[in-house]
Every structure is written in structure tokens, then in C-alpha cells.
Image (spheres, rainbow, N blue to C red):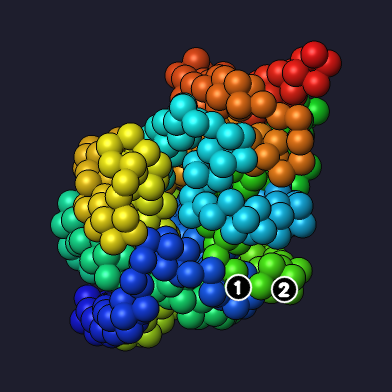
Amino acid sequence: MAHGFIYGFLGYLAALGILGAVVHTTSHTASDFMLGGRSLNYWTTAIAAHASDMSLWMFMGLPALAYSTGITSAWIPLGLMLGMFATWKFIAAPLRIATEQTKSNTLSAYFDARFSDTSGSLKLVSAFFSLWFFTFYISSGLVGMGWLFESAFNLDYYVGIILGLFIAISYTFFGGFSAIAKSHFFQGIFLVIMMVIIPIIAYFSLPEGTSLLAAMHNKGVSFSLIPATADELLMCIVLAISWGIGYFGQPHILINFMGIKDPSTMHKAMRVGMLWQFFTFSSSLIIGFLGIAFFTQPLQNSQLVFVQMVEDIFPALIAGCVLCSIVAAGLTTIATQILVAASTLSNDLYKHFINPTADQKTILKVSKYGLILVPFVSFLIAFTKSSTVYNLVEYAWFGLGASFGPVVIAALYLPNAKKEGIFWGMIVGGLTATIWPLLGSTVPSMLPAFLLNLLIIIATSKRSSAI
């Protein structure tokens, strides 16, 4: 198995290096590095937007949830699909047009221009929460990478997170946004093919006479989408809504909309992207369900249900190539998040507060330094082995969505929204999302944090317009 994985992985690294080298020749300015000069076609935008979202969560977090809880786990992808559809429909094209008009390369820069903030307060707050929650998001990818390398490559967990971080930083350093987006495109096509094929092969690999429903019943997991009690159903709906509305405030996803060449083709990108998401989500859930019957003995680490299934049903070389696709998905998503965080560090903090006269080449240089500095704390969190991929993604997703989602909506659809409301809304929303998980509440942090942020923005807008 190790040799098959090595050959597949080395081939991936070679392709990645060539891609980064080619794209590096076209990245001359900070805008090229951060947004690819807004030159992506709708196919690349569609796949990149969704692939930068899914990553190791789709291969490890979601199958683990389906394996552990059964069919009720489908509420989360259902909420995510509805949320992504709404984001494509109401956010993608308006945000692309608005950020070009204001010459903004990051969300923070757009907020600054949209709300005429000359003090830099919005940039400071948005940059703080962006860097804070991206620290945990990047950490989730490193945790998944560590477990994956340990299981498939027989490498120590800590060696895995170091190697994964090194590769992600290296090719982002040379290629920037274009390399990541184009890598997402080719990987996204390969991933959706693998995600459709693998559950089919796994199903026909089940021992003769095996009943999935019987296995689910024996292991005490749900085989119904509707929970047994009204309270459980309400919690499923709340969780689905919480994950869905998070899309409005995810910088690493929204940046893909900002990079499309022609905003009039956004509806085509939406169709491609939503179709990709449907197939990958469905397959990811089915893999988790099949794992309940596929593995006669309970897995010690449910996050590895996909990995161990692939190892069992494929020859070593093929399994190595398939698992390499998971590594690829994880690395490019980590790279996207590091790039967005580094862009925030250079564009929103360095240029505004340290060197306002910095030219494009200087900002580009600081961005590349940021690629090394930003992931350091993420590495320390991953190093402790203190949390799962799912829990880290949930914390970061809810935090980013609650901090920025209402602000994006207000910037695009509330003409009377004021800087003061945006400022305090972000602070209250971001702090609520930060602290809420510590209170032990069963209510997801997204709902109270998102609603408080939005209510503050609306209240200050009405008061300002009345005056």
C-alpha cells in the first residue's frame, strides 16, 4: 500500500510543481496573486468555489458523521446545498461586480470602500476575525492530513501535518490564486468521478447477504431522515439552517466569485457547481452509510471510513492514486485558506496600518511572507491532536459565517447600512461565535451570532434613515 501511495503522491507533486511554475510567470502584481487578475472562466470558478469548500471534510468529516449517526446526518448537506444555491443566486454576481468597481481584492477592502471607512476600524475588526477563524480552519485541514498520512502512508501523524503544510505553502507561494483555482478545477473533476465510482464498487464488495438496514439497526444508528422526536427534528432543521447560511460569509469561497472573468456567466457556473455538489455530497453520505455494513468491526477512528474502504477494495497502486486525490483536495483547500489569510495580513493590515504607500510589488512580497507566518498557530493546534476535523470545521465555519455573512448581505442589499452598525455587528457576531461553544449550549453558535450581527446592522440603518 505504501509504495502505491508513494507513486501516486509523487506524480501529484510533480503535476503541482509544473502548474505552480507555469502560473507563477503570470503573477506580477498583488491582484494577479490574490484574484488571478479576475480572469477565470465559469467552469473553473464553479468547481473551484465548491472544491475549496469541501476538502477533507467531505472525505473524512461527513462520512464519519454518516457512519456514526446514520441517515439523519443528511440534514447538514441538505442545508449546505440550499445555502450554496442562495449564495450563487443572490451574492456571487453582485459581489463580483461590486468588488471590481471598488477595486477590492479582499472582503475587508470591500467593506472599507463600501461603507466609506477612513479610520480603518472595519478593516481591523474584519481582519482580526478572519485570521482568528481561519487559524482553526487551516488546523482542521492539517489534522485531517496528519491522520490521512498516518493511515495510508504509514507516516507518523506529526510528520504528516508538517509535510502537508510544507507542500501547501510551497505551491501557493509560487502560483497564488490562479494555481489554486486551476488545481481545484482538475482535482474537482477527478474527485467527483471517484466519489461516484467508489460507493458503487463498495456496495458490490459487501459480503453476500449483507443488509445495510439490518447493520444500521444492529449498530444503533438512524435509518430515517426524520428523527424520532419533535425536539430532535427541530435541532436537525436548526443545524441545517446554521450550516447553510454560513456560505454568505466564507472568504475562501467568496473569493472564487470575485475572480471570475465575466459575471454574466455566473448562472452557468452555478449550474455546474451545484451539480458537482449534489453528486459529491450524495456519494460522501453513501460511503458513510455503506461503512456501517462494510466494516464488521467498529472503526477506532470513524474519520478514516473512506480511507480504509479504499484500501480494502482497490489494489495498492490504484488505492494510492485515489487517496492521493484526497490529499490533493486537502492541500488545495488549506492553500486557499492560507492565501486568503495572507492577503488579509498584507492588504488590510500591512498596507493600511504599517505602510500606506506600499506599491503592488511590496504588497505581493508581504503576502508571500504571510503564507509562512499565518499557519504557525494552526500548526500548533493540529499538533495537540485535541479535536476532530468536523469540530474544527464547524467552529471556523460558524465563526466566519456569523462575522461576515450579515455584512456581505448589508453591503449588497441594504443601502442605508452604516459603518457604525457594521462595526458593532461584526464585533458582537464574531465574539458570540467565539464564546458560544464554551457555554455548552446545544443550539449552534451560528444562529445567535448571525442574528445578533444582522439585527444590529438593521437597527442602526433604520435609526440613521429616520434621522
Q: Residue at x 61, y 34 (%)?
A: 115
Quarter location, residue 244: top right
Question: To which residue does mark 2 refer?
Answer: 265
Left or right of 368 on screen, residue 108: right
Quarter location, residue 100: bottom right
Please provide percent x and percent y for residue 413: 76, 41
Residue type at numbered disc 1: Lys
Check if mark 2's residue and mark 1's residue have beta carbons within 8 Å.
yes
Question: To which residue does mark 1 refer?
Answer: 261
Q: Nearer the viewer, residue 382 or 67?
A: 382
Please provide percent x and percent y for residue 295: 46, 61
* Circle 2 SS class: helix
Residue type at numbered disc 2: Thr
Please provide percent x and percent y for residue 197: 57, 80
Quarter that holds the C terminus? top right
Left or right of 155 on screen, residue 179: right
Q: Residue at x 71, y 55 (%)?
A: 94
Please provide percent x and percent y for residue 440: 51, 18
Q: Residue at x 72, y 73 (%)?
A: 265
